[in-house]
């Protein structure tokens, strides 16, 4: 089974907005050599989730994990994204599409953001 990962971000009109997401993609690729890792956007930017999925399936992926690079699970992740994955599942019935949880809800990320907030504010870490 060839598994691939799509880091799925919201997107923005400002192209520089994606720079931190590209850094995350590069870090994941470095840590998980041999696993295809792509970056897709919900809106305003390319590539889209369907575009990335199509490329990964064409490259032999039969399982695609979509990891939302969102702070929390809001309307997009509760409604739009599951519908998008259902469409992808219908388009590629031999491929398993898995939706991960919002990365910002992971305790490691919560603690990292707390540390970053304190450091950025010039306060000591406890």
Image (cartoon, rainbow, N blue to C red):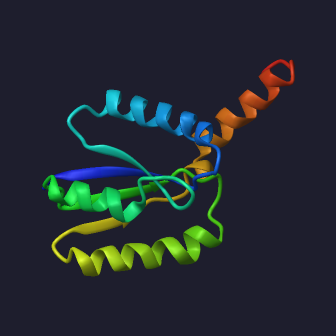
Q: Residue 81 placed where, x, y %?
A: 49, 71
Q: Is residue 101 above or below residue 110?
A: below
Q: Is residue 60 above or below residue 26?
A: below
Q: Is residue 89 shown left or right of residue 115?
A: left
Residue 73 quadrant: bottom right
Whether residue 126 can be seen here: no
- Name the one closer to the observer, 121 or 7: 7
At 61% from the left edge and 45% from the top edge, which residue is drawn? 107
At 56% from the left edge and 78% from the top edge, which residue is drawn? 79
Q: Residue 12 placed where, x, y %?
A: 63, 51
Q: Is residue 112 above or below residue 78?
A: above
Q: Number of marks in the image?
A: 0
Q: Is residue 12 shown left or right of residue 92?
A: right
Residue 110 quadrant: top right
Q: Residue 9 placed where, x, y %?
A: 53, 52
Which quadrant does the N terminus fall into? bottom left
Whether residue 27 can be seen here: yes
Q: Residue 59 placed where, x, y %?
A: 15, 52
At 55% from the left edge and 34% from the top edge, which residue is drawn? 19
Which quadrant does the C terminus fall into? top right
Q: Is residue 1 shown left or right of residue 46?
A: left
Residue 58 quadrant: bottom left
């Amino acid at each position: 089974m060839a598994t691939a990962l799509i880091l799925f971000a919201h997107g923005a009109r400002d192209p520089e907005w994606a720079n931190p997401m590209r850094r995350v993609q590069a870090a994941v690729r470095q840590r998980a050599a041999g696993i295809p890792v792509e970056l897709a956007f919900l809106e305003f930017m390319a590539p889209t989730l369907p575009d990335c999925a199509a490329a990964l399936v064409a490259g032999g992926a039969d399982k695609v994990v979509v990891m939302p690079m969102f702070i929390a699970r809001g309307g997009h992740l509760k409604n739009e994204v599951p519908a998008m994955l259902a469409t992808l599942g219908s388009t590629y019935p031999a491929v398993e599409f898995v939706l991960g949880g919002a990365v910002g809800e992971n305790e490691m990320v919560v603690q990292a953001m707390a540390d970053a907030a304190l450091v950025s504010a010039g306060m000591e870490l406890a």
